[in-house]
Amino acid sequence: MDSGNIQLVRRLERASVLVVDDEPGMRNFLVKTLTPYCLHVAEAGNADQAAALLAQRHFDVMILDNMMPGKKGIDWLAEQRDSGGFTDTIMVTAYADLETAIEAMRAGATDFVLKPFRSNQLLNAVGRCIQMAQLRRENMLLKRELEGQDIGQQRRELIGSSAAVSATRAMLARIRDVSTPVLLTGASGTGKEVVARHMHSTSKRAEAPFVPINCSAIPAELIESELFGHVAGAFPGASHAREGLLPSAQGGTVFLDDVTGLSPSAQSALRRVIEDGTVRPVGAEREIRLDLRFVLATSRALEREVAEGRFREDLFFRINVVELRMPTLAERETDIIELAELFLREIASRLALPTLEIDHATRAALLRHDWPGNIRELRNFIERSLIFGRFPLETLSPRGEQDEIAPLAQVERREILRALDATDGNRSEAARRLGVSRKTIDRKCASWGL
């Protein structure tokens, strides 16, 4: 089997196809041709049966006969598009004239196949249809990411070997393929999107789209149209139908960042989507069946948001099944150095700047700082350092010096590093001043990578 056929088989093996034809013989031929290659194949003898099947589940491709009793396939397809249907459609017709082709495309057909046709012609048409849909969605999502996403957030793996990150990895392994929504909580800048991408890339959905959505960045009046899509004429300015972000993620993962930024009506609609697995585009008469995994994130205390009326209680209970709290950077110990070195390489390469070496004093200062802005603050600090050609250590000071209560491990690390600074790195003298053994200092420094 050549590479072209291998790629075709891979596209088809995950495809769900609906065959719509009033002739039993043709319908049987189409189903028998597709079934060995496709994940799921369903059939309908008329438009009503097809509409009922489309309401039950998602189909990647619909193969539609044009000449059916009662209503032509082209006319029915146009009605489906107007009512909110977005299934990519291959029109089957016996007429090769240009007018029919133009009419089919205007009605919303992606491709058309002329009768009589061979099996390989049909399979290639379905493969092209799936490829075009995939490229269309990838282009749309790539454009969104280039416009609004931090390039550093597009990482797919968790960096670090600290106990906190190891515990996070263990939890992610347990929930790798569960369909239950996952709620990521914790302070801003702790890497929630990186974790969401990690979950997606290690799951069975990895080949499907990953769609990140910043809920607070979309105007409230547009958010339902952005998430669910809309039909032509749904509101002033909607001259064409548009697929929403949720349908564009079909089969994959949706990451809803800052979920508290959703309006009350969008929260209600999201709850229905999660519960029922369907979405209704704005202005549409029918619902679209979805197969999605939801990962939601917030840096706010949702219980307080619910108590103060800013977040719907029913949605909170629906998404608060699996909660994963992201550790702060200060809790991640030597991950600080590993991340700093990674950012140095990446940013220096991107900006075409010479890199910097993290010496002993810099390492100690990085470990001593509490990083209230977490990973985002560290990345900004590294970028600023590369631009100016030195580490501005004078801007780093532990928050623990202020009137705040820090975790015991952070206090311990801060005081040992402060003692080492005061004694010019003399561990024996630092141990004497702190009233601990030299072995304790050595053990702690080793665990911090010093």
Image: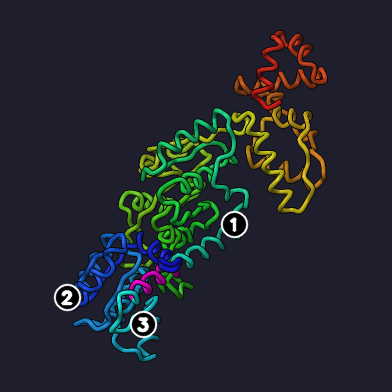
Q: In which quarter of the view is residue 329 placed?
A: top right
> Whole-percent x and y of residue 119?
30, 75
- Chain part drawn in magenta: 122-132
Residue at the location (53% across, 40% down)? 299
Three-letter amino acid code of the residue under disc 2: Pro
Which image quadrant: the C terminus?
top right
Q: Is residue 125 magenta?
A: yes
Q: Give the residue number, with chain letter if any, for mark 1.
A: 148
Which image quadrant: the N terminus?
bottom left
Residue 307 shows in this picture: no
> Whole-percent x and y of residue 195?
51, 42
Q: Is residue 194 magenta?
A: no
Rate crowding at label 2 as few (under 14), some (14 to 19) or many (20 or more) other CA atoms within 10 Å. Answer: few
Three-letter amino acid code of the residue under disc 1: Gly
Three-letter amino acid code of the residue under disc 3: Ala
Left or right of residue 214, residue 204 in this image: left
- Look at the magenta stretch and give its main secondary structure: helix
Residue 24: which numbered mark, if any?
2
From the viewer's side, name the closer residue of 445 and 240. Answer: 445
Mark before the other along the chain sequence, 1 or 2: 2
How much space separates mark 3 and mark 1, taking CA atoms? 36 Å
In the displayed orientation, state which residue is furthest to the front: 1
Q: Give the residue number, with chain letter if any, for mark 3.
A: 104
Residues at marks 1 and 2 touching, judged by CB atoms closer than 8 Å: no
Vertical order, 143 against 203 (above or below) = below
Q: Please, which colouring scheme is shown?
A: rainbow
> Whole-percent x and y of residue 288?
33, 62
